[in-house]
Amino acid sequence: MARKSKRVLIIDDEESIRDGCQQILTRMGHDATSTADAETGLELAAHEHFDLVLLDLRMPKIDGLEILRRLKQDQNIASAIIIITGYGTIPLAVEAMRMGAGNFLTKPFSASELKKAIKDVLEPVQAVKESDTLSLLIGGSDYMKDLKDTIRRVASTDSTVLITGESGTGKELVARTIHTLSKRSEKAFIPVDCSSLVQNLMESELFGHTRGAFSGASETRDGRFQVADKGTLFLDEISNISLDTQAKLLRVIQEQEVPRVGSSIPEKVDVRLITATNKDLRQEILDGTFREDLFYRISVVPIHIKSLREHRSDIPEISQHYLEIYSEKHSSVARRFSPDAMKSLISYSWPGNIRELKNTVERLCVMCEHEEVTLSDILYYGQDTKAKAPVVDPFSGTMTLVDVEKEHIEKALRHFNFHMNKTAKFLDIDRKTLRNKIRLYGIELEERNDE
């Protein structure tokens, strides 16, 4: 990955040290801010983001170790710290390392020594950040490795990205990961579900409006583009944008100017655009519902997310990951999957992809009453709740789908103390359907509670 510019704060009362460090950092491509005053330095570090602080140990008014202690005590400050010290204060520098400083430089130091100290402190931080961020994308298949590698390379650029894939594959997670690993990571990531925007207010939502621009516009309001300035804007389900708004969006991308509704003067913005869709935009172009010129503008870098059934080898790792998360969330005793249960998870078609898998695992964590999750603990709903899949081999004769559903409803009723509303909501059915199933399966209610 290309080296990103870092923000560095220099706190040193010697003007020659400040100026020398600032020149070297600028030549390295970093953004350097300096101050001779310790209190000012603490204020800057507390209210602005800095990747690195260069801190002199000998400061007037406040001792350097005291400044270091305050920096480390403030949980909102995550800056790496390099101590600047004279030969006579090397023992203090060692103490500073024990207190959390990442490195120290002894005066006088050369440009190469400063560069090496900065590299030693910052590059491991970036490597850990990458590792932690990409670890959210679960799976060790060749496909997942290639996807992570693509994200690393794309994140280092400012190119417009189009993410395609079925509903529930994790398109927003990929977009967030790209943003987190990009040079814009300290700025806003603004997600917008275009399918939820009201058509006649879509331009106002995206581009903002002035006071009195239309009925009900009682005050000037920023749109999503203005809010995302210097950061990343993620437009999910972009195919839902009307043709008129598509024309304006195309101009925004080309000119980096936003046409606020009610204003004749466009506003400059600096936004990285990532879009996503679960539709075939080329077919939408043929149907006349999506502009071809906009398609080429938003798909400079295309990333396709495969459906879960296309990388089934990742299902065991993903399932176990969410089992651990939801077991803790719901204080569940469930800890592992039986071989048959895992075989069932791998063989299921997952029409709702990872979103459906997460929901399935969370549901079984609420219902499961033993450490090992078995076939009878799993009930697939998918995105179409009318099409439930059998959770056992239908040829084994050990349990029918009716048996599984009956047992699942009984567990839900017991878990919610026979509250009909809560049980129906959890099962994603209405109360009438729940009562019909209770009668159909002959389920005995220990205690009726309709609250």
Image: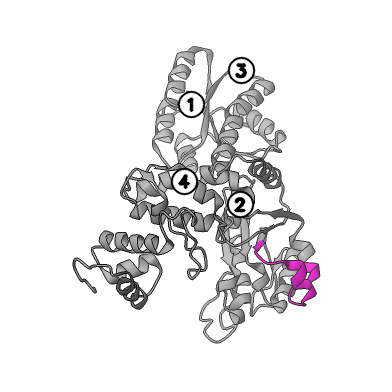
Of callouts 3 and 1, the N-terminal one: 1
Nearer to us: label 3 or label 1? 1
- Highlighted magenta segment, given as a residue range: 276-294
Of callouts 2 and 3, the N-terminal one: 3
Reading the image, the residue beneath label 1 is 101
**Left/right of residue 357 with respect to residue 145 in the rendered view:** left
Q: Give the quarter of the figure containing the N terminus.
A: top right
Residue 86 is situated, as x and y percent measured from the top left of the image, at: 53, 16
Task: Bin the neighbour count of mark 2 within 10 Å (Cα to Cα): few under 14, some 14-19, many 20 and up.
Answer: many
Nearer to us: label 2 or label 3? 2
Of callouts 2 and 1, the N-terminal one: 1
Reading the image, the residue beneath label 4 is 340
Residue 356 is situated, as x and y percent measured from the top left of the image, at: 51, 58
Instruction: Place residue 69 in its image quadrant.
Output: top left
Query: What is the distance, in whole Å, between disc 2 and disc 4 at their CAs?
Result: 31 Å
Nearer to us: label 2 or label 1? 2
The residue most toward the bottom is 215
Q: Secondary structure at mark 3?
A: loop
**What amino acid type is highlighted by mark number 1?**
Ala
Query: What is the distance, in whole Å, between disc 2 and disc 3 at their CAs?
Result: 46 Å
Q: Are marks 2 and 3 in contact (CB under 8 Å)?
A: no
Nearer to us: label 1 or label 4? 4
Of callouts 1 and 4, the N-terminal one: 1
Residue 282 colored in magenta in the image: yes
- In this orientation, which residue lies closer to the viewer: 374 or 257? 374
Task: Bin the neighbour count of mark 1 within 10 Å (Cα to Cα): few under 14, some 14-19, many 20 and up.
Answer: many
**In the image, is residue 39 above or below residue 327?**
above
**Left/right of residue 33 with respect to residue 329 in the rendered view:** right
Nearer to us: label 3 or label 4? 4
Residue 27 colored in magenta in the image: no
**What amino acid type is highlighted by mark number 4?**
Asp
